[in-house]
Image (tube, rainbow, N blue to C red):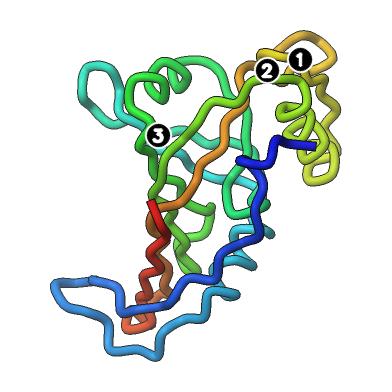
Amino acid sequence: MATPELVHKDIVPEAKPGWIFSHYASGPLLEWEWAHKRLREATTFWIATNALEGRPHVRPVWGFWQDGGFWFSTTNRSVPYIEADREVVLHTESGEEVVIVEGRCDRLFGKENLQRISDGYKERYNHSTNATDEGVYTLEGYGGPGFKITPTKVLGWIAPQFDTATRWDFPA
């Protein structure tokens, strides 16, 4: 079980018109449950970080939405980029039912916290991993640190019905 500061009930933010194509969407606005469902059901996500040289870096990741945030493990260039700038953007795999999360990415430590990611990978992807105090690793030893993205803003819309663009703000 994760430490109390990492676990909370999902917040139900108020929906307001999103800014799209140089104007605020006229609606109808999407309900939070619409975005929340897509975050819970997506299997592949894209994470955008800032490279150390200032250019964008995007890559697909596995992970899962739970307790008001996105939990995942990664390695390679993403790790130093996240450590240098914790502000990230996460996008579900769909370009038609769009959900974009902007937020803060925190590295997790401790086997108890990282076991949550290992368990989530087993449940979501039937992928066996082992949690340690430092990261989440496959049975062959591949893997890396675990992270949680806490949203500050979520955007969503249904293409081509762009007037559904909706924005949900979260407390910082």
Gap in angstroms between the C-alphas marked 2 and 1: 5 Å
Q: Which residue is mark 1?
A: 132
Q: Amino acid at mark 1?
A: Thr
The reply to whether dot 2 and dot 1 touch (C-beta < 8 Å) is yes
Gap in angstroms between the C-alphas marked 3 and 1: 26 Å
Instruction: Give the residue displayed 40% in from the left and 90% down from the top.
Output: 28
User: In the rendered image of this protein, does residue 153 appear above or below residue 62?
Assistant: below
Label 1: state its secondary structure: loop
Instruction: Give the residue displayed 41% in from the left and 73% down from the top.
Output: 157
Q: Amino acid at mark 2?
A: Gly
Gap in angstroms between the C-alphas marked 2 and 3: 21 Å
Q: Which residue is mark 2?
A: 135
User: In the rendered image of this protein, does residue 6 appear above or below residue 66?
Assistant: above
Q: Which quadrant holds residue 160?
A: bottom left
Q: Which numbered marker is on residue 58? A: 3
Q: Position of residue 33 (x, y in %)?
A: 60, 75
Q: Position of residue 4 (x, y in %)?
A: 68, 41
Q: Amino acid at mark 3?
A: Val
- Label 1: how many residues lie within 10 Å, few (<14), some (14-19) or many (20+)? some
Q: Which numbered marker is on residue 105? A: none
Q: 158 or 26, which lies in front?
A: 26
Q: Earlier in the sequence, mark 3 or mark 1?
A: 3
> How many marks overall?
3
Q: Which quadrant holds residue 5?
A: top right
Instruction: Give the residue displayed 78% in from the left and 46% down from the top.
Output: 124
Q: Position of residue 106 (x, y in %)?
A: 50, 31
Q: In the image, which is nearer the foreground, mark 2 or mark 3?
A: 2
